[in-house]
Amino acid sequence: MATSSAKKSGAKQFAKKPTARASNGPSKALIDDLVAGNRVLAQYGVVDAFGHISVRHDKDPNRYLISCSRAPEIVKADDILEFDLDSNALNNKLGRTLYTERFIHGEIYKRRPDVMAIVHSHSPHIVPFGVAGVPLQAVYHMAGFLCCNIPVFDIRTKFGMTDLLVRNRDHGSDLADILGDAPVALMRGHGNVVVGPSIPGVVYRAIYTEINAKLQQQVRALGGTPTYLSREEGEKATLTNFSAIERPWELWKKAAMAKR
Ligand SMILES: [Zn+2]
């Protein structure tokens, strides 16, 4: 859950008022990875025409990068726009349509200095865990990062009857509060948000959160008394897997970019 110290440190680090001007530009490597991240997530069924991935700007922590409103599988470098942490577009010269739910990204970057990349998706096997009152738990070592309490954001609690979308900063801020210092938050009747220390890291988590959710449903269908990973096991497994993150990333990126 959110700790007040985490919130305070995040607010302090990013309290600087952003200027309404685009930066000199992020690195080409960051843009390339963001384009690849979009396509990998589509290839693995985490996103379809909906859902998005962002990354914190590598030259200005008060900015983030995300595509204009476009299906992730066909995102190109030219589609990537720069935003301040209030989710105002800074270089949308062509007036392109923006993702309605971009506030998810800006509000989490404000609170979580450790977060460098974010995925929002409606990946299907995770959705039931936001509805059923059954906690999402780490079934196997590949999803060891789920060993902590995975919170559920219910937009109805604070905002009443809505269309479930995170449409403004208030919605995004409440979601960021519920996420706290967790790697994943479920969104009741909607989807989930996954955060990570890099584009490869967040793509890894988004893919294996979806796979773990599918496996957990299979575990429950078997009956019996499941033994999920303990917190200590999950933390150890996470260290091991993240030390080898370049191996899957090289494969995923190569395969996704070869498609078109
Ligand atoms: Zn959504």
Image (cartoon, rainbow, N blue to C red):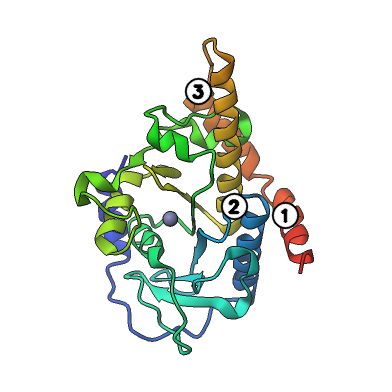
Of helix, strand and loop, which one carries label 3?
A: loop
**Whether residue 151 can be seen here:** yes
Cα distance between the residues tagged 3 and 2: 23 Å
Residue behind mark 2: 203
Q: Nearer the viewer, residue 89 or 229?
A: 89
Q: Looking at the image, is mark 1 or mark 2 earlier in the sequence?
A: 2
Check if mark 1's residue and mark 2's residue have beta carbons within 8 Å: yes
Q: Residues within 10 Å of mark 1 (few under 14, many from 20)?
A: many
Dot 3, crowdedness within 10 Å: few (<14), some or many (≥20)? some
Comparing marks 3 and 2, which lies closer to the viewer? 2
Residue 154 x, y percent position in the rendering: 30, 43
Please tell me the numbered disc located at residue 31: none
Q: Secondary structure at mark 2?
A: helix
Quadrant of the image containing the C terminus: bottom right
Mark 3 to mark 1: distance in Å?
Answer: 29 Å
Vertical arrangement, residue 146 with respect to residue 98, above or below: above
- Apparent side of residue 67 relative to residue 107 in the rendered image (left or right): right
Q: Is residue 201 left or right of residue 256?
A: left
Mark 3 or mark 1: whose residue is earlier in sequence: 3
In this rendering, is residue 260 above or below 22?
above
Q: Is residue 138 above or below residue 63?
A: above
Residue where numbered disc 1 is placed: 252
Q: Amino acid at mark 1?
A: Trp
Q: Which mark is residue 230?
A: 3
Q: In the image, what residue type sits under mark 2?
A: Val
